[in-house]
Amino acid sequence: MGYRGKVKEQEKARALRAHEAKLRQIEELNREGRNSIGTLSDGEFRVAGVALYAGEGAKGDGTVQFTNTDPKMLRFFCAWLRRFFDVDESRVRVRVYLHQGLDLERAESFWSNLTGVPREQFRQAHRAVPDASIRHNKHEHGCAYVYYCSSKTHRQIMGLVRALLSTDAIPG
């Protein structure tokens, strides 16, 4: 093997070691995070849900709407909504945004199982035409929009968001 070949092999080995070190650090920090957070109390769960909605939820009046591609975020949001608000399940809707060429039936089944919303309550999916010039990764289950049409519930949530973001709520 020539000089260039040896250098490339050394670079590959160095990159592999750095990648493995990164993965070990991520796992350790994930473990530290789980130990630090532990199991949420009802109060912590309420505030965490409010913070999540403040960042990712719709702010327009009348409808509670949360949109994300991350199943863990959607599962957390749905559990929070059902835990702290009087939800009429027949009024909960889901809409899937999915690139053409991906399996819509599979995606809707996935989100239905995750959210607990029957597929009969799904709105018509939006099928996006992939544009390779702006997006290279496509989420196999797409993006899910969870809707709950209730002005009162939305106003309750926004009251909690305003309380969370008030200067009185910020320590020190």
Image (spheres, rainbow, N blue to C red):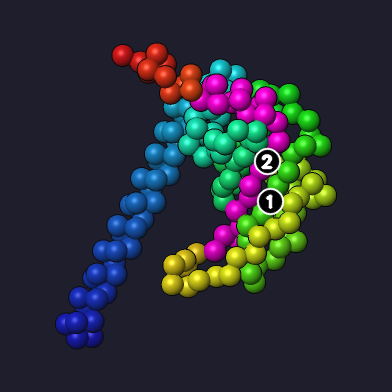
The vertical placement of 102 against 111, above or below, is below
| Most foreground residue, 153 or 169 | 153
Tell me which corner region of the image, top left, top right, bottom left or bottom right, holds residue 92: top right
Quadrant where the C terminus sits is top left
Question: Given the image, on which type of amino acid does mark 2 rest?
Answer: Tyr
Q: Where in the figure is residue 111, as x and y percent of width and height?
A: 69, 50
In what element is the residue under mark 1? strand
CB under 8 Å between discs 1 and 2: yes
Residue under the point 36% across and 56% down: 20
Specify start and end residues of the magenta stretch as a single range.
Answer: 138-161
Question: Given the image, on which type of amino acid does mark 1 rest?
Answer: Arg
* 78 with respect to 171 (left or right): right
Tell me which corner region of the image, top left, top right, bottom left or bottom right, holds residue 114: top right
Check disc 2: other Cα within 10 Å, few if <14, some if 14-19, many if 20+. some
Residue under the point 68% across and 41% down: 147
Q: Where in the figure is residue 84, as x and y percent of width and height?
A: 66, 23
The vertical placement of 120 against 52, above or below, is below
In what element is the residue under mark 2? strand
Residue under the point 50% across and 71% down: 131
Q: Where in the figure is residue 31, as x and y percent of width and height?
A: 45, 36
All told, the count of numbered labels is 2
Residue annotated with mark 1? 95
Residue annotated with mark 2? 147
Check disc 1: other Cα within 10 Å, few if <14, some if 14-19, many if 20+. many
Residue under the point 61% across and 25% down: 155
